[in-house]
Amino acid sequence: MTMSSRRIRLHWFVGSFFILLFIFLLMFRLGVIEKGEEDGDHFIPTQVQADRETWMNIYQQEQKIGYVHRQIFKTLEGYKILESVFMQINTMGMMQDLRFKTVGSLKPDLTLSSFGFSTLFQPVPL
């Protein structure tokens, strides 16, 4: 076996490996391969991060204009998700306070049980 035929085989092996890896990752991304367990036609995640609190900033053109506060916790009926959003934006020359509150109740299998949403818009004096 010559040196050039060894190189060709190595290239075919490496190329085949990356093609198979690409196909596997594509199938995972498209949902053909999923994590978790299947129960009939419902997908059940293997892990839920309950009793969790997250704070996130909202930026517009590198300037902070608000924040999001999200809480997830376990209840007797399943899970509850609370989310509060606050933004202060300039609309047509007026500063506006925007507040959103969302409450969601999930069953133990993470299907939506109930959902609530409220908003508040106020002009801010300059």
Image (cartoon, grey):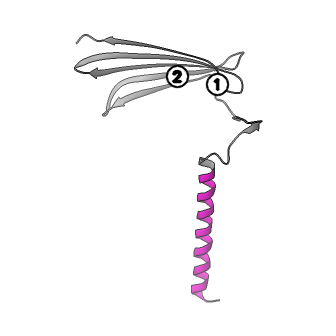
Disc with the residue nearer the chain's start (1 vs 2): 1
Q: Residue furthest right?
A: 40
Write the residue at 22% across / 20% down.
93
**Looking at the image, which residue sits at the far bottom?**
2
Given the image, on which type of amino acid does mark 1 rest? Answer: Ala
Magenta stretch holds residue 75:
no
Name the chief secondary structure element in magenta: helix
- At x 58% / y 58%, what residue is drawn? 22
Instruction: Tell me whether the residue at label 1 lies in contact with that at label 2, contact meaning CB atoms closer than 8 angstroms.
Output: no
Corner quadrant of residue 80: top right
Q: In the drawing, what numbered circle is on residue 8?
A: none
Q: Residues within 10 Å of mark 1 (few under 14, many from 20)?
A: some
Mark 1 element type:
loop
Q: Position of residue 90 (x, y in %)?
A: 27, 22
Residue drawn 27% across the image and 17% down it: 95
Quadrant assignment for the N terminus: bottom right
Residue that mark 2 sits on? 70
Instruction: Please give left or right for residue 98 compared with residue 73 in the image.
Output: left
Residue nearer the viewer, 92 or 97: 92
Q: Secondary structure at mark 2?
A: strand
Left or right: 5 in relation to 61: right
Q: For the residue carrying disc 2, how many other residues have a C-alpha within 10 Å: few (<14), some (14-19), or many (20+)?
A: some
Residue with the mark numbered 1: 50
Residue 11 placement: quadrant: bottom right
Image: magenta residue range: 1-27
